[in-house]
Structure formats: structure tokens, C-alpha cells
């Protein structure tokens, strides 16, 4: 998708490409109190640089990117493009999304021409520029193909061509390689970097949201680490390594380790070895971690070469875990007191080691005790069921309480997570048909 502003703004060549000052974004909740998603973000994109944005799921990365484009207005603060305020989609800024977002009834050429048509470019010039963009992105010969005829990598190349055809000053990338297999993603990423370093595209700045740490370190001149609830910039890491970058270079690996450390460190929390998990609230955004994966990871951590302690980048590589999966698992283990996470490492605690060595029933009891102790939502549901004469309660009651803190979608996800944990631990039963909790099976 390509964004175009109407009317075209007057820009200043001396001003920064993009600047965000004190940007906040609040979404209204059913009780009208509002949910803060972005909190006082200051950001500047300079001419000739690539900025990577990393953060856990739900940290507001994509919302921030859409705020920079003018697709989402900030609740507070301002965004400017070359010194002019951004009040809507901007001519000169293009965006590539994670999903391919192609119109299936249009050919490759038709999809790429869309942005130019929206700008009112004459048909002949539109055709010439679209063909040139298709050629430069490596799809020459597929102009008349339809999306259904293309592989995932080729469809994403169409997305890049559609963005580049408008000759954007700034390219905003929202996890553009995450829907592709590893080899296809690497090829497309390398092709994009070749276009950038060889100055074969007019783009002067790139901002890329990613969930792949090594990808961001490979591409970016600096990386921003977003914190969660609300989203804010917790840290910034400059990367001065020359391109192309070697992923095995010791300096590269050190930067990757630093990023892992920052992503797993919450400002203000005690990260000392042996520190107890801190108390959380009822509306805490529980990580989406299946119990079976948690158990498998605990067992794996007790085995060689880890023997109870692992470096997170190494663990992700060896166990083939993407960042979102890994962070959900380690956050849950830390939350439940089964592991301690600090300095880019994870180490099993005594309860975690005992869990790994236990049989099925003792494991269930240990998991139940940890969930009741450390997850207020689970304890709250069980307390309500214990106190009610019929020992039953509708899910809607707890969903409404969660929506005081979270969006409807996120509240449902958190409730589904606690249902899965509670069922496994036999803390309560849940009936999908009646959408109600009970103690009937106990």
C-alpha cells in the first residue's frame, strides 16, 4: 500500500526527513477511561539512515509506524515530514506491510500502478514507471501475472515495487519479511540492501519494524528498543559496522546480545540473580505461551549443553524459536518463578528444576500453585468460583474486567491464555458452549 497526501505539502530540504515530538496514542475503552498505547515518543529520522524498531508483541511498534505515515493521528504530540506537519497520508512516504495486500483481480502491473493512479499520473507515464519499478525489484517478465500465480516472495516484491514506484523519500517497513520462509526473506532483504547501497532507488531514509533481532542488526544504522504497556523507547543502539555485515563477527554478536538483554529487561524491575518475580495486576498482558511448550523448554534447559542456564541468542538459534515465541516462553517462566532472566541469559530456579524432574501429577500441582500465586487473573477467577454457591461464573464477567485495561481483542487473548493454563492446572473447568467457568469437575 502506498500513501499519498492531498494537497501536496511544501517541504524543506534542510529539515529532518521525519520527526516525532512527544507522540502519545490513546485508544478509548468501553469505560471511556482510555488505553495508552504510545507514551511521549521523540524520534528523528535523518537523511541517509536506516532505523530498526524492535519490541515485544503489543509494544505499539506498528501503531507508531502508522502514526509516522499519517494513517493514525496522535492523541498528543506531533509528527512532521521535512519540517511540515503530518495531518494525513504524506506524498513522499511509502509503506510496505507484513501482509501482501494485493488486489487479486489486478495483474502485477495493475497493482503497482495503483499509487501512481491515485496521484493522477498520466496513463503512459504510469505504465513506464510501473514497468521500471517491476524491473528493479526483480519481477521483469511477470507484469501480466496475477497474485495467485506468484509465490509469497514474489507477491512481497510486488508490494515493494508498489511502494518504490512513487519515488518515496522515506520507506516504512512493517515486518515486511516475517511472512516469508527464511531463504526467501534473506534473498529479498539482500536485494533491498543492494538497491539502497548502490543508490538505485531515490529513498533517503528507511524505518523498519521487525521481530527478528539479527535482521535489524544486519540492516539498521541504529536500533530502537520499545518497551510495552505503554509503548515507549527504552533504549537506542547505534550500529557502525560496515555493510555487508557478517553475522558471525564478534562485534555483531555482541550487539545482538545487547539487544536481547535490553528486550528482556524491564526498567525499574529488579533483575538481580535470585530476585523474586514481581507482582502484576489483574489486567496484565499475559504472554501467549502454551503449557506444552513451557514444559518442553524447561526440560531442554536441564539438558546439555545448557545444564540449567542458557544464552538467549544461542537458545533461540539452537531450538529454532523466533523472537516472539522465545520472549513469550521466557516471560512466562520468569513470571511463574520457574526461571530467572537477566543480562540476556535465562537460568532455571529451584522450582523450575524441581518441575523438570517431577512426574505428571506433581508437575500439575506445581504449575497450579505457581499460577495461583503469580497470576492475579487466575486467582481472581478461582476465588469468585469458590465464593459462589453454584461455583459457576460467566466468562463475560471476567472479560469485562479485562477490557477496563486492554483492548477487546487483547482482553479475549489474555482470557484464552488463562483458560488454557487453568484447565491444564485443574484450577477450574471451562465450558466453551456456555462460555462459563465452573468447579464442576473438582
Image: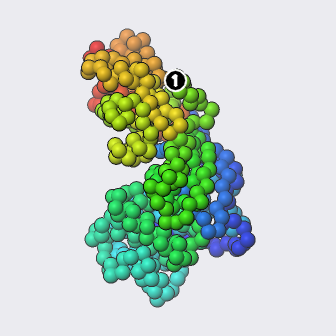
Location of the C terminus by quadrant is: top left
Q: Compared to 74, does 241 lie above or below?
A: below
Q: Could you say whether the residue bearing mark 1 is in a helix, strand or loop? A: loop
For the point 35% across and 15% down, the residue is 391
State whether residue 324 appears in this view. Answer: no
Task: Say which of 269 and 434 sits in front.
Answer: 269
User: Which image quadrant for residue 221?
Assistant: bottom right
User: Which image quadrant for residue 231?
Assistant: top right
Task: Say which of 253 and 71 sits in front.
Answer: 253
**Which residue bears the numbered disc 1?**
274
Neighbor class of circle 1 (other Cα within 10 Å; few <14, some 14-19, many 20+) is some
Q: Compared to 326, does 364 lie above or below?
A: above
State whether residue 385 appears in this view. Answer: yes
- Side of 166 where 22 appears, left or right: right
For the point 52% across and 82% down, the residue is 121
- Side of 436 where 231 appears, left or right: right
Amino acid at each position: 500500500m502506498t500513501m499519498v497526501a492531498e494537497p501536496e505539502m511544501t517541504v524543506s530540504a534542510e529539515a529532518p526527513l521525519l520527526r516525532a515530538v512527544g507522540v502519545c496514542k490513546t485508544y478509548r475503552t468501553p469505560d471511556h477511561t482510555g488505553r495508552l498505547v504510545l507514551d511521549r515518543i521523540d524520534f528523528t529520522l535523518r537523511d541517509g539512515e536506516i532505523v530498526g524498531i524492535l519490541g515485544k508483541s503489543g509494544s505499539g511498534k506498528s501503531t507508531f509506524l502508522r502514526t509516522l505515515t499519517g494513517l493514525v493521528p496522535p492523541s498528543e504530540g506531533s509528527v512532521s515530514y521535512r519540517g511540515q506537519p503530518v495531518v494525513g497520508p504524506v506524498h513522499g512516504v511509502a509503506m510496505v506491510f507484513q501482509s501482501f495486500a494485493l488486489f487479486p483481480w489486478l495483474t502485477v502491473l495493475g497493482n503497482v500502478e495503483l499509487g501512481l493512479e491515485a496521484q493522477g499520473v498520466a496513463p503512459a507515464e504510469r505504465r513506464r514507471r510501473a514497468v521500471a519499478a517491476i524491473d528493479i525489484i526483480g519481477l521483469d517478465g511477470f507484469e501480466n501475472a496475477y497474485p495467485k500465480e506468484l509465490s509469497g516472495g514474489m507477491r512481497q516484491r510486488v508490494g515493494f515495487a508498489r511502494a518504490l514506484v512513487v519515488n518515496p523519500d522515506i520507506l516504512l517497513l512493517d515486518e515486511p519479511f516475517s511472512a516469508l520462509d527464511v531463504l526467501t526473506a534473506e534473498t529479498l532483504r539482500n536485494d533491498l540492501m543492494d538497491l539502497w547501497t548502490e543508490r538505485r532507488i531515490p529513498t533517503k531514509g528507511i524505518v523498519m519494524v521487525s521481530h527478528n533481532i539479527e535482521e535489524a542488526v544486519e540492516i539498521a544504522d541504529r536500533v530502537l528498543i520499545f518497551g510495552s504497556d505503554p509503548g515507549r523507547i527504552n533504549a537506542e543502539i547505534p550500529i557502525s559496522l560496515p555493510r555487508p555485515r557478517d553475522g558471525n563477527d564478534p562485534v555483531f554478536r555482541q550487539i545482538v546480545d545487547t539487544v536481547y538483554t535490553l528486550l528482556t529487561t524491564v526498567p525499574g524491575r529488579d533483575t538481580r540473580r535470585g530476585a523474586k518475580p514481581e507482582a502484576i495486576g489483574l489486567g496484565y498482558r499475559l504472554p501467549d505461551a502454551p503449557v506444552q511448550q513451557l514444559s518442553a523448554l524447561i526440560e531442554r534447559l536441564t539438558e546439555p549443553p545448557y545444564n540449567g542456564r542458557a544464552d538467549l541468542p544461542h537458545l533461540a538459534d539452537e531450538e529454532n524459536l523466533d523472537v516472539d515465541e522465545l520472549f513469550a516462553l521466557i516471560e512466562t517462566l520468569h513470571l511463574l518463578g520457574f526461571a530467572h532472566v537477566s543480562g540476556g541469559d535465562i537460568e532455571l530456579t529451584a522450582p523450575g528444576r524441581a518441575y523438570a524432574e517431577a512426574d505428571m501429577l506433581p508437575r500439575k500441582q506445581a504449575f497450579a500453585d505457581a499460577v495461583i500465586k503469580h497470576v492475579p487473573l487466575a486467582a481472581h477467577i478461582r476465588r469468585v468460583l469458590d465464593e459462589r454457591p453454584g461455583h459457576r461464573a460467566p466468562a463475560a464477567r471476567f472479560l469485562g474486567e479485562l477490557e477496563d485495561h486492554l483492548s477487546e481483542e487483547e482482553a479475549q487473548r489474555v482470557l484464552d491464555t488463562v483458560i488454557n493454563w487453568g484447565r491444564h492446572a485443574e484450577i477450574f473447568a471451562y465450558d466453551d458452549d456456555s462460555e462459563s467457568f465452573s468447579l464442576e469437575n473438582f
